[in-house]
Image (spheres, grey):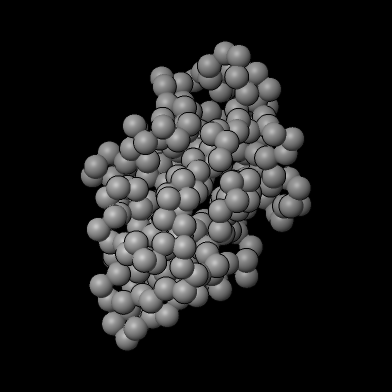
Amino acid sequence: CDIELSLDAGARTKIDELTTKLKRSTVHFQSLVDRANIYFPFIEEAFDLRGVPQDLKYIVIQESAMVADAVSSSNAVGYWQFKEASARESGLLIDAYVDERKHIFQSSLAAAKYFYTIARYYDNYLYAVIGYNRGPVGAIPYTDVDAFGNRKMRVTAETHWYALHALAHKLAFEDALGKTDPPMWLQPLNTRGETDVQTLAEAEGLSTEEFKKYNAWINGGKLPEGKHFIYYVPRKGKPEQTLLRHVGGAARQIGEK
C-alpha cells in the first residue's frame, strides 16, 4: 500500500508461522488459489474504481475464503464479511430479493469504500487494515497519532493481529496467483431489466440451482422490478480480459468516494 514496512524478529516469526499454516495443505491452498484466480479480476476492478491499493485484495481470503454465503459467529455475511448495518451504510442492497454482501463486485466496491474512508482519517493504510476489523473508532487504541501519514512503518509482534494476518495472506498468495488456469471462469452479464431467475438461467443453459450457485446474492426466484443487476455465468476455457470487466457502468456504482 505504498508503505515501506520494517518487520522486527517477533513479527517475522509470527508471519512465518501464519504463512506456513496457510500452505500446510497443498490441496486446500490450491483450491484457494483457483478461487482467487476466478474472483480477483472483479475485486481488482472494484478497487481500481475506488482508487485503493491492490495489496488489500488478499484480505478477502482472510475474511471468507471467497465463499459467497459465509456467515460468521457475529452474523457478518459474504465475501467481505459485512454486518447488515455497515453493509447498508456502505451502499449495499439487502432486501427480500437480494443480499449484495454475497455479490463479489458490489461487495468489493463497498469494502474498497470502507478502506478508503478509514485511510482518509488515518492517512495510513496499515491502520486502515486494522480499522477494517475493529472499526474506525475501535482501531484508535492500536494506532499512533505520530504515525498518521507515515510511509515508513515498523511492524512488531505487538502489531494488531489482523494486520499481521493480512501481511501473511499477501505473502502466501501473491506469487501463487496467475500461474495456473482455474477450472472455469465467470462472465459478468447485465440482467437488463429481466426479473425472473429461471429465465436468466435457462438462457445460459443452466438449471436454476446451478445458476444460483454462482449468484448466491439472489435470495429467491425473482429480482426487483426496475433495476439492473450484474449476474455471473460459468464458462470453460481461458477468458478474454474484456469479458471479465463490468463494462459500460453496467454494475450499480455505490457511494462515490
Q: Can see residue 140? A: yes
List the single residue furthest toward the front. Answer: 146
Query: In the picture provided, is 198 more to the left or to the right than 82?
Result: right
* 169 or 33, nearer to the observer: 169
List the single residue furthest toward the top. Answer: 225
Picture quadrant of residue 228: top right
Give the residue drawn at x 47%, y 50%: 120
Query: In the picture provided, is 21 more to the left or to the right than 60?
Result: left
Give the residue drawn at x 41%, y 55%: 122
How far from the left and from the top, in percent, is residue 175? 56, 73
* Above or below, 121 relative to 213: below
Q: Can see residue 23? A: no
Picture quadrant of residue 7: bottom left
* 153 or 175, nearer to the observer: 153
How far from the left and from the top, in percent, is residue 103? 50, 38
State which quarter of the image contains the C terminus. Answer: top right
Q: How many marks?
A: 0
List the single residue furthest toward the bottom. Answer: 9
* Above or below, 203 relative to 146: above
Give the residue drawn at x 41%, y 22%: 95
* Above or below, 62 relative to 72: below
Give the residue drawn at x 37%, y 51%: 132
* 156 or 19, nearer to the observer: 156
How far from the left and from the top, in percent, is residue 172? 46, 72
How far from the left and from the top, in percent, is residue 179? 62, 70
